């Protein structure tokens, strides 16, 4: 009397499945890396834009400050005080924008897909662990 034992898959079938699963896993990891790099690129772009805006305001503030000094020396009237107030405000805004932009750039560097690398390492470790047991 023949026993009904579960049929074992052939080695060829097992290798085919492993190959398909590996290819799927690699595609998924590459997509994760792509998404992560896109996000970091957006942050870097925002940071660079904020630093650029801060620099532009800094230069404008310096020009206004120079105008205030010129007005103060040329006229010695209270008109220079208003120019000085505007210059100080522009310089303060420039400082805030530059610091905010620097933080954005710092978050984007280094442009390495850290999450994708960690996930891939976990996958490789799992495959190795299952291969031993």
Image: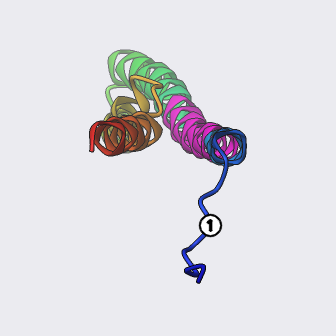
Q: Is residue 132 visible to the viewer in this orientation of the structure?
A: yes
Left or right of 64 in this view: 38: right
Give the crowd class for mark 1: few <14, some 14-19, many >=20 residues within 10 Å: few
Tell whether position 46 is magenta. yes
Q: Which of these two is toward me, 11 or 42?
A: 11
Q: Nearer the viewer, residue 15 or 22?
A: 15
Residue 128 locus on image (x, y percent): 34, 35
Residue 14 vs 106, above or below: the answer is below
Q: Is any atom of residue 90 visible in this view? A: no
Report the coloring of the rendering.
rainbow
**Magenta stretch secondary structure, dominant:** helix
Q: Residue at x 52, y 38 (%)?
A: 40
Judging by the rendered image, the residue that carries numbered circle 1 is 7
Quarter of the rendering occupied by the N terminus: bottom right
Q: Give the residues drawn in magenta, as a range.
A: 23-48
Q: Quadrant of residue 33?
A: top right
- In this rendering, position of residue 1 left or right of residue 96: right
Q: Give the image quarter of residue 38.
A: top right
- The residue located at (71%, 47%) in the rendering is 13
């Amino acid at each position: 009397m023949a026993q009904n034992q579960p049929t074992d898959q052939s080695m060829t079938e097992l290798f085919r499945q492993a190959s398909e699963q590996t290819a799927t896993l690699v595609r998924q990891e590459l997509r994760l890396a792509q998404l992560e790099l896109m996000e970091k690129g957006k942050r870097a772009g925002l940071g660079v834009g904020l630093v650029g805006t801060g620099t532009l305001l800094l230069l404008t503030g310096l020009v206004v400050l120079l105008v205030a000094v010129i007005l103060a020396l040329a006229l010695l009237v209270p008109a220079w005080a208003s120019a000085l107030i505007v210059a100080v405000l522009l310089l303060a805004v420039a400082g805030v924008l530059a610091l905010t932009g620097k933080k954005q750039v710092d978050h984007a560097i280094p442009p390495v897909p850290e999450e994708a690398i960690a996930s891939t390492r976990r996958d490789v470790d799992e495959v190795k662990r299952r291969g031993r047991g």
